[in-house]
Amino acid sequence: MRPEAYSPRFQITPLLLESITAATELRAWIAQAVVDVSWLPALQGETAARLAHSSTAIEGNPLTLPQVEAIARGEDISATAKSKQEVRNYLAAMRWIWARKANATLSEKEFLQLHRLLTRKTMPPDQIGGYKARINRVVDAKGRTIYTPPPPEQARVLTQRLLAWINSKDSRKLHPVLAGGIAHHRLVSIHPFADGNGRLGRALEAWLACSRGFDTYHLFALAEYFEQDRKIYYDKIQQARDLDGDLTYWLEYVAQGVVETLSRTKVRIISLQVATKAPRIILTKRQEDVLRLLRDHGRMKSPDIERALKLTRARINQIVRPLVESGLVAKDGRTRATTYRLP
């Protein structure tokens, strides 16, 4: 017997409609702008690192973005084993999400697998991919309980109802931003696991965006918006609970976050579009930094670039030489008097 589906409550306000329209237009622009461009893989890797950093930081992971980027490159850093593992887990979960087929359903088995990916080696083995056995609480910065989720005996059935809604026709009729926001909020309110519920809620939202065609080539880092002001993020989640489950204000907040996130992505793409007319080259992050410096300053000497990036002359030469050879950067003069500019 199939479980009864969850039924969300919300209204389509003018602000929500305006934000959804703007997000759809931005998504279409990005999809058209990044077709077969050389710097896309580098930008995708950077987005994965930013997602892992922001989503784990919301729950207290102390690693900085440069440290997370180093882990994403396969490097080791000086940090606690748990902090590093949380980041590796989130990167693995995003790879798993991005590999899913379009319009796929999400089974309970796959849902539990996503929790296992996010919590591997950071929780007791019997809690990884398994529903909670004890009552848990949501507390504020002072340790005061602000929300008590449903008890353990309800965790599985409520989760099954959420999954039934996610896979339903009613859910698929909604814009992916709305469906993702609803699933995110409902999951963190059920709080079905001993730990990892927030990361799983944000990952579930990413899965819905990806599986329903709103992924923008894996350049979507909505968790950054949530992380930039964690208090507002938590307040908005709690506000919907205080309103007896009315998700209207929460969805307005999420939709505005999608617009802000996609707007930043658009600005970033515009700053890199100098590469679209050049011979194909896979840009490194440092090479992207050089292109942005030249875009902003017009013309720079080697010592100027060295100071800006805090790198040695030899390292700058290694970074810039492929850019010059590919025609992305023009080189004038020789030795220390050499200047670089965009063609």
Image (cartoon, rainbow, N blue to C red):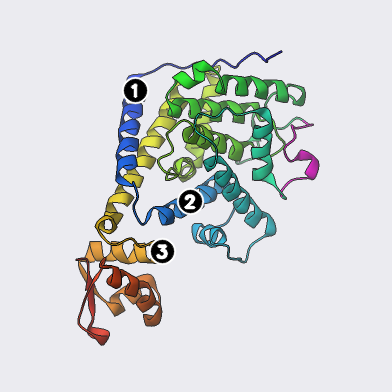
What range is drawn magenta here?
A: 122-134
Q: Residues within 10 Å of mark 3 (few under 14, many from 20)?
A: some
User: Is there any visible trace of residue 60 in the rendered image?
Assistant: no
Secondary structure beneath label 3: loop
Report how far apart the C-alphas of labels 2 and 3 lie in the structure: 16 Å
Question: N-terminal of the two: label 1 or label 3?
Answer: 1
Q: Main secondary structure of the magenta part?
A: loop
Quarter in which the N terminus is drawn = top right
| Residue type at tag 2 | Arg
Q: Is residue 172 left or right of residue 110?
A: left
Q: Is residue 261 left or right of residue 146?
A: left
Eyeballing the image, is 223 above or below 282? above
Give the residue at mark 1.
Answer: 17
Eyeballing the image, is 111 above or below 95? above
The disc placed on residue 6 is none
Q: Residues within 10 Å of mark 2 (few under 14, many from 20)?
A: many
The disc placed on residue 284 is 3
Give the residue at mark 2.
Answer: 50
Residue 110 x %, y %: 65, 34
Report how far apart the C-alphas of labels 1 and 2 lie in the structure: 28 Å
User: Is there any visible trace of residue 255 in the rendered image?
Assistant: yes
Q: Residue at x 51, y 59 (%)?
A: 69
Secondary structure beneath label 1: helix
Total numbered circles: 3
Report how far apart the C-alphas of labels 1 and 3 lie in the structure: 38 Å
Question: N-terminal of the two: label 1 or label 2?
Answer: 1
